[in-house]
Image (cartoon, grey):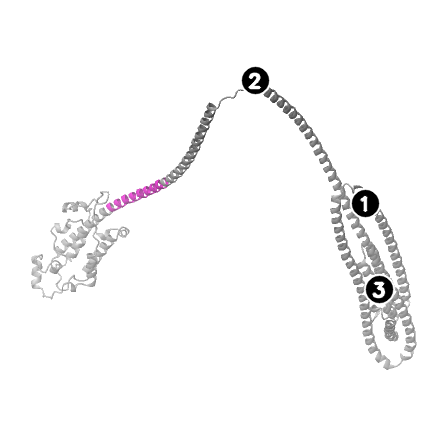
Amino acid sequence: MKSVRTTTTSSFLPSGQMPFYQMSGYCQSCSGSETDVSTSTENLTSEERHALRRGERQDPQGQETLAPDELEDAASRSNTLVIRNNSSIDGFTSPLYGKSLTPERCISLTPAPVREITDIPKHYLDQSEVLKHLAKEVHNQRTHRRGSSLSQSHPDLTQVGGACKDAGASASEENATKVVNQLLEENAALKAELDLYYGKASRLQKLELELQKVQQAQEELVRTTEKREKLQAAMRARLELERAKAHDMNRRLREQLDAALSQLSLRSMPEHNDAELKKEVSRRDVLIAQLLTQNKELSAEKERKDIELQAQRATLQEQRNHIDILDNALNNAQANVVRMEEECRKKQFYVERVNQLQKALGNLQLANERRLQMEKRCRSQLERDVETLKTEGKAVATSKKESEDTEHLRKVLREYEEKIIALENEVARWEQRYLEESTMRQIAVDAASVPKDAKIAALERTSQESEKLIAQVRSEKLKQMDELYASQRKCAEQEGKLKDMESRLAEKEAMIKVLQHHSQEKDAALQSAVLGRPRHTRAASSVPLGSSTASVAVAHRRTGSKDEIGSSSLAVVSSESTSNATNTVTSQAAACADAKRSIDEQLKEFGSRLSNKESIMDALRLESEQHPSEHVWRV
């Protein structure tokens, strides 16, 4: 154990420095075993030797007698990291490097009073792995010392030599505090060295950044110098070319000058007479005078031509303006003609529509007259049947069997009445629908066909006329004016025709109103006639009248234009007034009849109704056989 502890404490000291307890003479271990240091008993005291001689001899087993905890402590102590302080790069050394500690110095370094490693705060021990390891060793040593002896091969010598044990414990405590102090100093030195290295690293980073900036600036400078060199080379080449060209030109000019000088020197001046020279001069003067006069004439002619050209341009511009005016007038006339034609087509369409409406009105009037005639025949037949049934009902009323059959007859009569009313309504509805669909279809076909053909024809005419009139604007101006006047006359004629048609429409409306008034008077007369008759006559005749008036009103409402809306509304109002009047009158008559009737009269009425319905069906069949072309009246 002594050897293990020696390595533990000496590992934290600098090289060449002895532990404090070895220098002070404490060489004995706590256990007193000779196998800790060597196999002899040289280091034992006399008391220990005496105890060994008197004690029982046990076979030595060496380290096999050690407990597992001691083996782990020994392994951990032998594996302790040895920190060596070498000189750094910049010459900085640890303050404890190369210094030998004397016992006095060790005592002076330890604080008073001496504190054990277990007294050091835990948070401070957690900051260093070495301090934690030392504290763990001290703690394990104390617990092992309390529990059992350190060696199984020798007796416990701590009880024999108590003084040696106390001395060894104090020495171990002093050594532990000394080691802690040394570690603290070395830790402070290492922190200072680490701060120094941090500063150096920051300076190196700054230096690297500066080097990068310098490198970038150098690269930019290289690029700029390369560009400058390229530009200089290009300028130099261009200047060289210009210099070569100038040199060649100078050489050619010198050659020409030399040739001219040589010719002048070699040429001999011919001799001329003064008379010939004077003639030549006079001739040239005359030629110059002629050229001057010709130049003046040409300049005057040029000015005159310029004036004429300006006048021609002015007249041309005036003619163009006049042509534009004529074009605008022509376009306006064409637009007016097209508009008039469109209005004429619209008016013609209105005329055709009025004719169609007149035809539809005639058809409705014929249908109404036929219905009235049929109703008159039916009413006369029903009146005759009623009279016959009255005479027959008086003789039959006394029998009981007839009273039993009355209920059955009532049911049958109701069914027949419902069927007849439904058939009459369906006939009237189909008739009205047929008339409406035929008129609307004809109007739609006419409205769809007329504008398209007219537009196509108008477009073709306008395109052809525009192509012809653009080439012959001036020659056809008067013709266009005549056409414009003619179109105005046509427009006036069309307006007269339109007024005539409006007057005709007013007459037709007056006729329609008169017919409506006449029909209202007829309805009033029929209602007054119905008041004095039994209920079955009213039920048989009022439904067709109401359906006919309603059908007429619906026909006017669907097929009428703006001019016909008023007449149709009047017809609807009149029909509503007549229906209200008939309803009020019939309600009063029904109230009176119900008050006065008896059971026998009701039976007679049901029988008469049944006979009336059968007679109506027979009359309708006969009429359909007589007039097979009229599909709307078939039952």
x, y percent for residue 488:
82, 45
- Looking at the rendered image, the disc whose residue lies closer to the viewer, 1 or 3, is 1
Q: Are marks 1 and 3 in contact (CB under 8 Å)?
A: no
Q: Which residues are magenta?
A: 189-217
Residue 483 image label: 1
Q: Report x, y in % for residue 185.
A: 22, 46
Of tags 1 and 2, the one toward the viewer is: 2
Q: Amino acid at mark 3?
A: Ser
For the N terminus, the image quarter is bottom left
Residues 617 and 403: in front is 617
Q: Please name the amino acid that badge 1 sits on.
A: Glu
Q: Position of residue 620 (x, y in %)?
A: 86, 72
Q: Residue at x 68, y 30 (%)?
A: 306
Kind of residue at badge 2: Asp
Which is more toward the observer, 287 or 234? 287
Magenta region, main secondary structure? helix
In the image, which disc is placed on residue 548? Answer: 3
Q: Which residue is mark 2?
A: 274
Q: Is residue 330 located in the magenta-colored stretch of the structure?
A: no
Residue 575, quarter of picture:
bottom right
Q: Is residue 598 visible?
A: no
Q: Secondary structure at mark 1?
A: helix
The answer, for residue 568, to whether it is visible in the render is yes
Q: Is residue 559 above or below residue 408?
A: above
Q: Earlier in the sequence, mark 1 or mark 2?
A: 2
Q: Is residue 247 above or below residue 131?
A: above
Q: CA distance from mark 1 to mark 3?
A: 54 Å
